[in-house]
Image: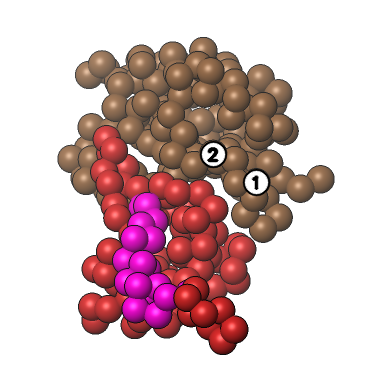
Chain colours: A red, B brown
């Protein structure tokens, strides 16, 4: 899997991006707690880890090791390719 | 049967007792030399001096380091302590230079935060709903 469209199909992955949007730079532990407690997602830590792997592969998140901990950050840059392909300014009645 | 002692592995017992008393605010309960520079070293909450003791246990077994490193890498706390006002504790401990990997965050019915105890562990604090 290597495109952002596939990466965004899973609700869990969209929830991960929502949570990182709310607070950037989270450990796996914090993300797991948020997905369980706030989104009611019943996922194992391994499953969440795999979702993070998919998001990282397409560049929607980056990870950074600071000292002994690993943090996850959102990077929405790849989403620009969607808007570049289908510009949001183009819709009926909005000629430009 | 009662839970009397629970434990946390620490890299250095002297450094740990300093952190757990002067920074976190627990009080030393038992300090018994065990030989080989090891101590039976426990602290308790001043709010509950006859309550559960926390044993600051030497982390010298070779299996401890890789195990703890894996937990810390994923941000997983070793144990959890209860606090009345998590925002006040977060502010107080941050002011003392304590590093938080997770600031106070509402997780369903509880609000939790996670900090580094400087002795090789992440510790969670939590405020229970009234």
Q: Residue furthest bottom?
A: A92
- Report crowding for label 2: few under 14, some 14 to 19, many 20 or more residues within 10 A (C-alpha): some
Residue B50, image x, y percentages: 67, 26
Q: Is residue B96 left or right of residue A48?
A: right
Can residue A95 be found in the magenta stretch?
no
| Residue B18 falls in image quadrant | top left
**Magenta-colored span:** A72-88
Residue B30, image x, y percentages: 50, 18
Q: Is residue A54 left or right of residue B55?
A: left
Front one among B75 and A93: A93
Q: Residue furthest front?
A: A96
- Report crowding for label 1: few under 14, some 14 to 19, many 20 or more residues within 10 A (C-alpha): some
Q: CA distance from mark 2 to mark 1?
A: 10 Å
Badge 2 element: strand
| Residue B16 falls in image quadrant | top left
Which residue lies at the image location 36% right of the left edge and 53% below the top edge? Answer: A72
- Closer to the N terminus: mark 2 or mark 1? 2
Q: Is residue A55 above or below residue B29?
A: below
Front one among A79 and B117: A79
* Residue labelled with disc 2: B103
Which residue lies at the image location 37% right of the left edge and 26% below the top edge? Answer: B118
Pick the quarter of the image with the C terminus of chain B.
Answer: top right
Q: Is residue A62 left or right of residue B2?
A: left
Q: Is residue A54 visible?
A: yes
Can residue A83 be found in the magenta stretch?
yes
Front one among A68 and A91: A91
Q: Residue furthest left?
A: B62
* Residue labelled with disc 1: B111
């Amino acid at each position: 899997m290597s495109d952002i469209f596939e990466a965004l199909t899973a609700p869990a992955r969209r929830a991960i991006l929502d949570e990182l949007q709310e607070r950037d730079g989270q450990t796996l532990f914090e993300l797991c707690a948020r997905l369980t407690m706030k989104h009611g997602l019943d996922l194992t830590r391994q499953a969440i880890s795999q979702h993070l792997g998919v998001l990282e592969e397409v560049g929607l998140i980056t990870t950074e090791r600071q000292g002994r901990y690993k943090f996850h950050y959102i990077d929405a840059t790849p989403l620009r390719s969607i808007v570049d392909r289908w510009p949001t300014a183009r819709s009926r009645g909005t000629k430009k | 049967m009662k839970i009397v002692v629970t434990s946390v592995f620490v890299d250095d017992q002297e450094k740990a007792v300093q952190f757990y008393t002067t920074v976190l605010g627990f009080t030393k309960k038992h300090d018994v030399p065990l030989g080989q520079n090891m101590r039976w070293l426990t602290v308790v909450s001043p709010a509950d001096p006859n309550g559960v003791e926390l044993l600051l246990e030497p982390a010298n077994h070779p299996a401890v380091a890789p195990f703890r490193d894996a937990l810390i890498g994923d941000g997983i706390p070793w144990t959890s302590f209860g606090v009345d006002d998590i925002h006040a504790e977060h502010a107080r401990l941050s002011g003392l230079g304590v590093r938080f990997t997770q600031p106070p965050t509402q997780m369903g019915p509880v609000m939790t935060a996670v900090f580094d105890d400087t002795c090789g562990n992440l510790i969670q604090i939590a405020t229970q709903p009234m």
